[in-house]
Amino acid sequence: MSTARARRHRRSREAALTVTVLFAAKPESWADYAAPLRAAFAEEGLDAALVTEAAPETVDYIVYAPSSGLEDFHPFTRLKAVLNLWAGVEDVVGNPTLTVPLARMVDDAGLTQGMVEWVTGHVLRHHLGMDRHILGQDGVWRRGAPPLATERRVTILGLGALGAACGQALARLGFPVTGWSRSPKRIEGIDARSGADGLAAALARADILVLLLPLTTETENLVDAARLAELPEGAVLINPGRGALIDDTALLAALDAGHLAHATLDVFRTEPLPPEHPFWAHPKVTVTPHIASETRPASAARVIAANIRRAEAGAPLHHLVDRARGY
Ligand code: NDP
């Protein structure tokens, strides 16, 4: 018997669990998630009723995205936990009606892998100076090879699921990687810093700065004029974290003054980014439409099912959000 089949068999012999799971996201997401979630629940031996509508008092778990419009959790009197479909929780973490545990999405095979690819690609674009050849082909034979990765320092603010994985991928390519997080860490391949002194040191060596912090009251506007001034001359900023981590006016000023060479931005204070926003037309800004990485239904469904199974077994949920910290 294959390992997966043996696991299914063992679980099917365990007491059947009957839980009601409400899928509360944009209606059009249901088509993508219904089959993967059903398969993942079956794989976990969960006898789950997966629904898009239910009497609130019958619901045990909510698979949640704020775009569902669901804001009042009070009527869900039997609710045991909410499992957020996205990694960022800034739109739900402060909801006073949500009093049960909240888990965010951490999915190495999908969301994390996608972010590693996006960040690595954009770091390499700037490191190798790809634009010069892709956009500037003018019949002139200009020599000058790019430096090696070992000569380009990358700093990642945020060393969580995404920041640590991106940092380690870049370190494997040879980039000297410095990281910064709230709590001190040891991560192979990354010079991990924390605290105010750690931030100053991390910024000072950021030839390329990548933001993978969550948006909280502490991180909002963290990258302001003073912090931008601490970056080396000619630094590049890459932000797949959240738009409000950056003071937009200060960023534009730093680009216009030539202190920063370029900013690649995936996330914005207002999304979609309004057509008249100066980022669109700025020659030193690349806008990508919040596509750095997204939750992938197949692998995310397995993460959700395994977490519900943990909760049903009385174990604490993985990837629990700390309400006080805001992430
Ligand atoms: P995690 O919660 O795993 O990691 C967050 C990291 O930020 C941790 O290392 C944490 O420190 C650090 N941090 C938080 N607050 C502070 C602070 N005040 N000072 C210093 N460090 C701080 O999150 P993920 O890695 O899963 O995701 C990061 C963010 O990426 C998400 O919140 C979301 O905004 C964004 N995202 C963007 C996507 C896109 O497509 N553009 C897709 C997915 C996510 P510590 O380790 O000490 O707790």
Image (spheres, rainbow, N blue to C red):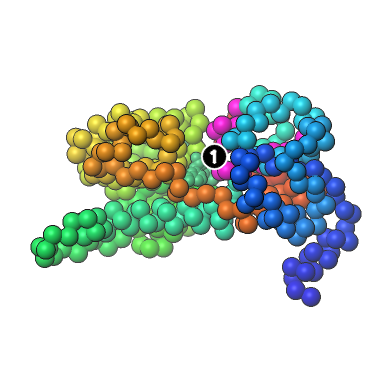
Residue at image coords 10%, 63%: 140
Question: In the picture provided, is 249 more to the left or to the right than 17?
Answer: left
Q: What residue do we see at 28% from left, 53% from top?
A: 126
Query: Which quadrant is home to the N terminus?
Result: bottom right
Position of 119 relative to 85 (above/below):
below
Q: Is residue 150 left or right of residue 326?
A: left
As helix, strand or loop, the secondary structure at mark 1 comes to loop
The residue at which mark 1 appears reads as 88
Query: Could you tell me if residue 100 is visible in this image?
Result: yes
Q: Is residue 295 left or right of residue 171?
A: right
* Mark 1, other Cα within 10 Å: few <14 / some 14–19 / many ≥20: some
Up the image or down, 57 lies above or below 41; here it is above
Residue 93: give x, y in percent of width and height. 60, 31
Q: Is residue 24 magenta?
A: no
Image x and y of residue 191, in percent? 41, 51
Residue furthest out toward the left: 140
Cβ of mark 1 under 8 Å from ligand 1: the answer is yes
Q: Amino acid at mark 1?
A: Gly
**What's the magenta region?**
78-94
Magenta stretch, main secondary structure, is loop
Q: Residue at x 72, y 33 (%)?
A: 100
Image spot of residue 230 (x, y percent): 28, 37
